[in-house]
Image (cartoon, rainbow, N blue to C red):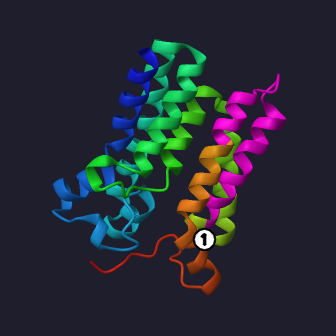
Amino acid sequence: MKIIITIVLSYLIGCFSSAYILGKLINKTDIRTHGSGNVGATNALRVFGKKVGIMVFILDVLKGILAVYIGGKLLGYDGKLLGGFFAVIGHMWPIFLQFKGGKGIATSFGMLLSIHWPTAIITFICFVIILLLSKYVSLASILSCVIAPIVIALVKIPFDRKFFVTTLIIAITSIIKHRSNIIRLLKGQEYKIGEKVKR
């Protein structure tokens, strides 16, 4: 029963779409009709500006942290992994938005931060370096998905197979969710950091 409660609560936490809700409350705008149409922090930054973008990022990170905390309280370490995983799934496929959500990067970061902060910090540093060099948030996000499981394998001692597999599955899923970004990157049509879109 605790497993079901953890899954349902974590999924519902993930379904809280901060980009959609803040867009409606602050800007009276449906973010899904602007920019890339994605309900994540990057598109919120492009469409609504820094203030809302940062708020969305923080709230999405907190979703991962909260789900891990609840899962840990209910089921211990396995509950943390389960909670974090389903929070990301909820963010990617929210039931309240016809299962069309974000890419899961910020929520995944919240999960990593709660379970093994060194992995989160190292991955975040790599993200920032890639972003500064390329100016593409999507590229930094995609490569961070590749980097995170590798960091776990190298840094988490002893090797944590459950954590590694959970993160690997999330990473692969997120990369698949980035497929439209990958196409735009290859065509040279992807937005760079700081570029705003017309609403």
At mark 1, the secondary structure is loop
Q: Is residue 85 above or below residue 127?
A: above
Residue pictured at 61% horizontal, 59% vertical: 175
77 sits left or right of 163 in the view = left
- Give the amino acid at mark 1: Lys
The C terminus: image quadrant: bottom left
Query: What number of labels is visible?
Result: 1
Q: Quadrant of residue 1?
A: top left
Q: Is residue 171 above or below residue 143?
A: above
Q: Is residue 120 visible?
A: no
Residue 56 position, x and y percent, is 37, 50
Q: Nearer the viewer, residue 99 or 111?
A: 99
Question: Is-magenta flag for residue 163?
Answer: yes
Q: Nearer the viewer, residue 17 or 128?
A: 17
Residue pictured at 39% horizontal, 36% vertical: 11
Q: Is residue 117 visible?
A: yes
Question: Is-magenta flag for residue 149?
Answer: yes
Which residues fall within the magenta stretch?
A: 139-167
Residue 31 position, x and y percent, is 29, 65
Q: What main secondary structure does the magenta stretch of the protein show?
A: helix
Residue 25 position, x and y percent, is 17, 53
Residue 132 position, x and y percent, is 64, 65
Residue pictured at 35% horizontal, 54% vertical: 99
Q: Is residue 148 above or below residue 26?
A: above
**Number of other residues with Cα within 10 Å of mark 1, as a class: few under 14, some 14 to 19, many 20 or more:** some
Residue pictured at 57% horizontal, 69% vertical: 179
Q: Is residue 23 above or below residue 74?
A: below
Residue that mark 1 sits on: 135
